[in-house]
Amino acid sequence: MATVEEDLSCQELVELVTAYLEMTLPPLEQARFEAHLAICPGCTNYLAQMRETIRLAGMLSEETIPDDGKAKLLDAFRTWKHQHTGE
Ligand SMILES: [Zn+2]
């Protein structure tokens, strides 16, 4: 069972999503990532969207996702969250 301090926030999940999709996360991080997905339908949807986006783009690597790209992903996630929560 995951403890509270092991729980990922949604933002942490977004930051890890590229590594998760590349299966480069350490086992512990991957477990935390999947534990969050299990309790967060929003992030499950987000991950599905990311998979689709990456499939369409046809490429994903550490080199093609620089920090600038991560920032854009975070922006996209904030926009998405806003649309879905009305915050
Ligand atoms: Zn979440």
Image (spheres, rainbow, N blue to C red):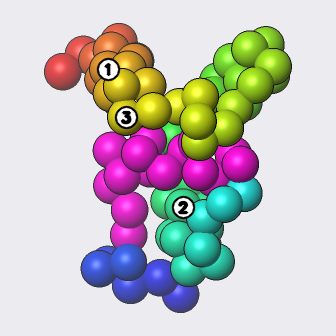
Percent coordinates x, y for residue 53 in the rendering: 68, 18
Q: Main secondary structure of the magenta part?
A: helix
Q: Which badge, 1 or 2, is on the more N-terminal residue? A: 2
C-beta proximity under 8 Å, tags 3 and 1: no
Image disc number at residue 33: 2
Q: Quadrant of the C terminus?
A: top left
Please give the name of the residue rendered at 53% of the width and 87% of the height, measured from the top-left corner. 1
16 sits to left or right of 18: left
Between the C-alphas of marks 3 and 1, the distance is: 12 Å
Q: Dots 1 and 2: beta carbons under 8 Å?
A: no
Q: In terms of image quadrants, where is residue 71?
A: top left
- Mark 1 or 2, which is nearer the eye? 1
State which region is magenta: 7-22
Residue in front for this viewpoint, 87 or 76: 76
Could one spot residue 39 in this view of the protein? no
The residue that mark 3 highlights is: 67
Residue located 60% across and 64% down the image: 25
